[in-house]
Amino acid sequence: MLIELEESQLVLVDYQARLMPAMFESAAVLANANRLAQWAALLEVPVVYTEQNPSGLGATVPELAAALQSANARLLSKMQFSAVEEGLGEWLRPPAKPVQGNARSLPKHLQKPAASERGMVVIAGCEAHVCLLQTALNLLEDEFDVWVVTDACTSRTERNRDAAFDRLAGAGAELVTTEMVGFEWLRSAEHPAFKEMQALIK
């Protein structure tokens, strides 16, 4: 199964100023997170980003914050390690609105269908074995299709990061890379955004 652009949402977890310097391969990870945010902005993919205990760990690093602003991303501040425990699931899948109208309302077969639900969550962040892992596992429990962008995830140690990937794969998450996400969103070199997205890879 490929990642569908129209069904995708992007979640970026805890790329914070006081956390990132201690992370394994943090520069490469941040560069990939930045690409994901820029591509989401270009392709109008909804974006949510989280900050764990921002008074203690600081805000999102400035270079990523700028890309998130361009993507009109929503910020979820949290104290729980899993962002789902702080309401992320409701942000990604808002509760259905009650049917409004009166007896003269159109019958169901003539009503416009509701906007298609975006049930695919492309997620990356840190630490991979704590906040990213717990959030992704909870999203799987909530029946989202979860795609973990491995080269945009990190922990303080490589071993912790890799253990998280093993556990997530076993739980049913798809493990992908930044470029996999971008090219599956595009699907074709004829896509209007292809050249701009390709420039962000180079």
Image: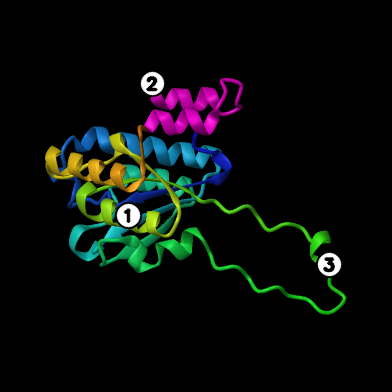
* Residue corresponding to mark 2: 202
For numbered disc 1, what is the local secondary structure? helix
Residue 58 shown left or right of residue 67 in the figure? left
**Residue 122 % position (x, y):** 42, 44
Location of residue 141 with respect to 44 vertically, above or below: below
Q: Residue at x 20, y 49 (%)?
A: 129
Looking at the picture, which amino acid does disc 1 mark?
Answer: Leu
For numbered disc 3, what is the local secondary structure? loop
Looking at the picture, which amino acid does disc 2 mark?
Answer: Lys
* Residue corresponding to mark 3: 107
Residue 83 shown left or right of residue 96 in the figure? left
Say which of 81 and 202 sits in front.
81
Q: Which disc, if any, is residue 137?
A: 1
Quadrant location of the C terminus in the rendered image: top left
Location of residue 136 with respect to 34 vertically, above or below: below
Tell me, what colour scheme is on the image? rainbow
Residue span colored magenta: 178-202
How far apart, in angstroms, are the residues tagged by discs 2 and 1?
Answer: 33 Å
Q: Residue at x 15, y 38 (%)?
A: 24
For numbered disc 2, what is the local secondary structure? loop
> Pointer 1: residues within 10 angstroms few (<14), some, or many (20+)?
many
Residue found at the very far right of the displayed protein: 104
